[in-house]
Amino acid sequence: MLIEQDFAEIEVQRKSENWRPCFYTLGDTVVLQSVDAAFAVKDIYQRVDNEDMRVFLQQKTASDTEVP
């Protein structure tokens, strides 16, 4: 599992998938079946200050304050 620090992207390579990379971004959940764990990408980047997180949090705040 590789976690980028400059932008919100996680790469996971699995032997069961012939080491092909799978990419996860904000809004996705990374599932690690071998250790029976799942992580929301937004939780992994919760304390990271980069452009992707600023935009994600801004959009989340805007959608939370919208009136239906």
Image (tube, rainbow, N blue to C red):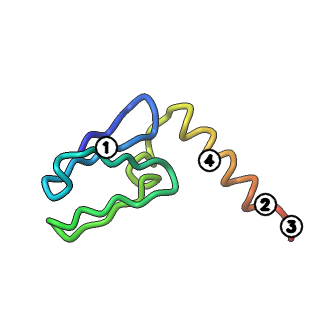
The reply to whether dot 2 and dot 3 touch (C-beta < 8 Å) is yes
Q: Which one is in front, 30 or 45?
A: 30
Q: Counting residues from the N terminus, which is met first, the one under dot 1 or under dot 4?
A: 1
Element type at mark 1: strand
Residue at image mark 4: 57
Crowding near the residue tagged with mark 2, few <14, some 14–19, many ≥20 C-alpha atoms within 10 Å: few
Residue that numbered label 2 is attached to: 65
**What residue does disc 3 label?**
67
**Circle 3 SS class:** loop
Q: Kindly identify which residue carries mark 1.
A: 11
* Kind of residue sitting beneath label 2: Thr
Q: Earlier in the sequence, mark 1 or mark 2?
A: 1
CA gap, disc 3 to disc 4? 18 Å
| Total numbered labels | 4
Residue placed at 26% from the left, 40% from the top? 2
Q: Is residue 51 above or below residue 3?
A: above
Q: In front of the other: label 1 or label 3?
A: 1
User: Disc 1 to disc 4, how far (Cα)?
Assistant: 22 Å
Q: CA distance from mark 4 to mark 2?
A: 12 Å
The x and y percentages for residue 45 are 42, 46
Circles 1 and 4, Cβ within 8 Å, touching? The answer is no
Nearest to N terminus: mark 1 or mark 3? 1
Residue 21 place in picture, x, y as percent: 28, 44
- The reply to whether dot 3 and dot 4 touch (C-beta < 8 Å) is no
Pointer 4: residues within 10 angstroms few (<14), some, or many (20+)? Answer: some
Amino acid on which disc 1 is placed: Glu
Contact (CB < 8 A) between labels 1 and 2? Answer: no
Q: Residues within 10 Å of mark 3 (few under 14, many from 20)?
A: few
